[in-house]
Image: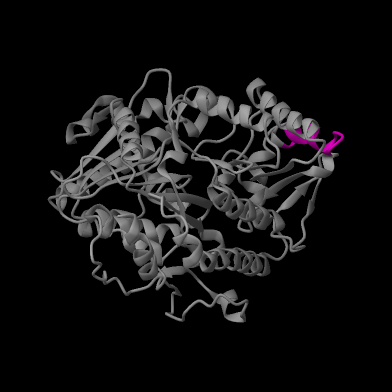
Amino acid sequence: MHNLIPKTVKWFHTKKLLISNQIELKFSCSSIIKNITSITMTTEEKDLEFETIHSELHTLTWLHKNTPCFALRGSEVKIIHEPNVFYSVLVQKCKNARKRITFASLYLGTGKLESNLVNAINEALISSNGNVEVKILLDFMRGSRGKLNSRKMLKPLLNGKYSHSCQIFLYHTPKLRGFLKMIIPDRFNELIGLQHMKLYMIDDDIIISGANLSNDYFTNRQDRYFLIENCKELCDFYDELVQKVGEFSFVLQSDGSTILNSMKIDPLKDPITFIEEAAYSIRILFQKQFEESSDLEKIEKNLDVDTWVFPLIQMGQLNIYHDSQITCKLLQTAPPGSTLKLATGYFNLTSEYSEALLKHCQATCHLLTAHPSTNGFFSAKGIAGCIPAAYTKLEESFVKNCNKLGQQNRITLWEFIRPGWTYHAKGLWYFLPNQEKPCLTLIGSPNFGYRSVNKDLETQIAILTKNKNLQHELQKEHERLFSCATRVTNKTFFEQDRIPPTWVCAIVALFRYYF
């Protein structure tokens, strides 16, 4: 099989990205790129006939034509199952860092575990005499919430001996400004959009996850965590992505104040120009990496690779819709006999995803989401305490659509229940026909909901592998999550504690596009 890789790659070399009006995207910095409204896929979907090729990969080869590709060995991918292990690995790798520590998260918590993580980063700075470059990207609003917040937790890095080696970026959405920003309470302003990417790079290793950097995510909030080691090129790409977002973010200063970074366009004062320039910056980076992925000579040297990583980005507030289109394509083209297992902590599938699953997808589908008792808002005070009931209403609506279209035997909804835990895992496991183990997974920050698609900065990776050990680990991962699940049936929604109040149903009807 290995001697077929160069031939396969040559076919992949024909890949293209088109903009919505079918004008081909150029790799040069031409003015046309500024006006791109979305990154879309080419309509040319015919598979060329290879001399031979693994049937398990054949139906997914279109991925190589639509996103950058990083080839590696499956043995370099490690799946972490428990949040405490995620935390331990993160701290240990930070302590031993020699070159860089680059994080992107929604926020950093304010407890002892988070403080220890900051100390580990500081320890790396001291032991390397400031040679470790630290970049941390957080959301401005979420990272500023409360008197003790992420900004205050990170101040020690900016007041230490090696502060010159640290950059703390705070991304502020251009959509939240003026009167709207004044009237929306802190806990709900994130509905307008935020920085939601979860990337944790130390040197040439990366942990990609859906988990934030806070106590719950280190102890009893179930998520997914993939550690990819010795992947310099992938880390370089994501490091540069964080840097690019940082360039149009605010920068935290040693006194706790913030200033605009190098782009010098305030998202609150000039949102239109901000969106144009920020989107242009991201697309140039993405196109550059896309071009480099077409370097046949470089890829052909790695004949022992058996796994391919495809970064997907989604920045709806910047009019970038790459991840959602790739995901939709995966759902739409799943053939008969295949199986899809999809997970999300918050069940609010967009109409495009729902239509792809219900009307186009031919696979057997199992969807996993949080039971109300494992929803992160369970027992929350005030209106937030009814959020689990809102998701129950959305589940009911989806199940009714399944029944209406006669898809109830093909599509099954499950809810994760684990006493003392909350659920936040999201992603996809893809089983091709006649395969007992998945050969592809999606792992990262997107939740497959409206806010994730249209309002937040998101990224995930598609991992395609023919490595049997990695396929086995993917099988173990999804089995472990589904082992804590109970099946949702029509009767579920008639249980006394599952009937949402009328006002909650009204809220769902009015605001489902914001979460």
Q: Position of residue 134 (x, y in %)?
A: 72, 42
Q: Vertically, is 33 above or below 380?
A: below
Task: Find residue 273 and report its image quarter.
Answer: bottom right
Instruction: Report the residue at 57% width, 53% height from top.
Output: 233
Instruction: Report the residue at 21% width, 58% height from top.
Output: 359
Q: Vertically, is 329 above or below 345?
A: below
Instruction: Report the residue at 57% width, 45% height from top.
Output: 190
| In front of the other: 304 or 426 | 304
Residue 140, visible in the rendered structure: yes
Q: Vertically, is 448 above or below 494?
A: below
Q: Vertically, is 83 above or below 237?
A: above
Q: Is residue 399 left or right of residue 189?
A: left
Dominant SS type (magenta): helix
Q: The magenta stretch spans which residues?
A: 151-162
Magenta-drawn stretch contains 102: no
| In front of the other: 499 or 260 | 260
